[in-house]
Image: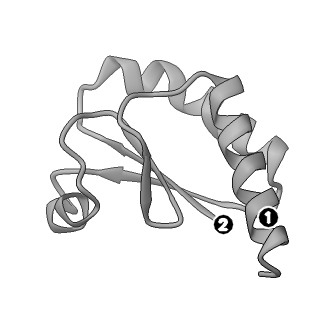
Amino acid sequence: MIIELFYAEGCQQCLRNRETLKATAQQTLPDMVWREINVLEEIDYAVELGILTLPAIAIDQELVFTKLPSAAQLTQALIERVTKEKSYGN
């Protein structure tokens, strides 16, 4: 699973929360891939995903959070996604 945090340079909210969210994701899914994407460097990809506000989080190339979630919200989203994948046999 790939988790992508979209941010812009100087985003204080991103800086304050990214380590907590990354640690939460690693604790929930140790095999996940964490990417931090500067939206100005990958603007085409951000537009493709429909990102209109920052910070945002995509999971497996799907926009899931249009603002930073709490650690509990991220954990819940990851668990739901894993459960869904298992039920579909992926």
Which residue corresponds to the image point at 38% horizontal and 19% vertical from the top-left? 13
Image mark for residue 68: none
| Left or right of 35 in this view: 23 | right
Which residue corresponds to the image point at 22% horizontal and 35% vertical from the top-left? 53
Q: Residues within 10 Å of mark 2 (few under 14, many from 20)?
A: some
Occupied quadrant, residue 14? top left
| Residue 37, percent from left and from top | 35, 53
Looking at the rendered structure, the number of numbered marks drawn on it comes to 2
How many angstroms separate mark 1 from mark 2 (CA)? 7 Å
Mark nearest the camera among 1 and 2 is: 2
Of residues 32 and 65, the one nearer the viewer is 65
User: Is residue 80 at least partly visible in the picture?
Assistant: yes
| Left or right of 21 in this view: 58 | left
Assign a secondary structure to mark 2: loop
Identify residue for label 1.
31
Of residues 73 and 40, the one nearer the viewer is 73
Quarter holding the N terminus is bottom right
The answer to whether 21 is drawn above or below residue 34 in the figure is above
Q: Residue furthest front?
A: 87
| Residue 65, percent from left and from top | 44, 38
Identify residue for label 2.
1
Which residue corresponds to the image point at 23% horizontal and 35% vertical from the top-left? 9
Callout 1–callout 2 Cβ contact below 8 Å: yes
| Residue 81, percent from left and from top | 69, 56
